Amino acid sequence: MDVRIKNLKVTMQLGNDGVEFEIRDGEGKHIGDLLVGRANVVWCKGKTRKKNGVRVKLIKLVGMIEETARKPARRKRACPEGLVDLF
């Protein structure tokens, strides 16, 4: 995974334009852009524009991350060959 800042307009505080991260996979293929602003995070998959991206309030994102961190990791059970693991 390769993450680069595309447009940095930040001194000490996050500016009005925020920070834009370019996300690429291990082979260098563009996956999308992540825009972080003062109150929102926007995920723009592929060539999606900011106005059409998935917008999440920053405080909600923090809650989602904290909730994920509280859940114990699930272990996969070995499944007999030919059966679908439903767990």
Image: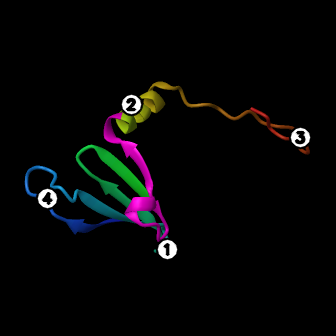
Span shown in magenta: 44-59
> As displayed, is residue 79 above or below residue 20?
above
Alpha carbon of mark 2 to alpha carbon of mark 3: how far? 36 Å
Q: Amino acid at mark 4?
A: Val
Which of label 3 and label 1 is nearer to you?
1
Quadrant including the C terminus = top right
Please give the label number shown on residue 29.
1
Task: Give yes or no for residue 17 being in the magenta stretch.
Answer: no
Instruction: Read off the residue under disc 3.
Output: 83
Extreme right residue here? 82
State the image quarter where residue 23 is shown.
Answer: bottom left
Q: Secondary structure at mark 2?
A: helix
Tell which circle, 2 or 1, labels the residue nearer the N-terminal end.
1
Tell which circle, 3 or 1, labels the residue nearer the N-terminal end.
1
Instruction: Read off the residue under disc 4.
Output: 10
Which of label 2 and label 1 is nearer to you?
2
Alpha carbon of mark 3 to alpha carbon of mark 4: how far? 53 Å
Q: Amino acid at mark 1?
A: Lys
Residue 62: % across, % down: 35, 35
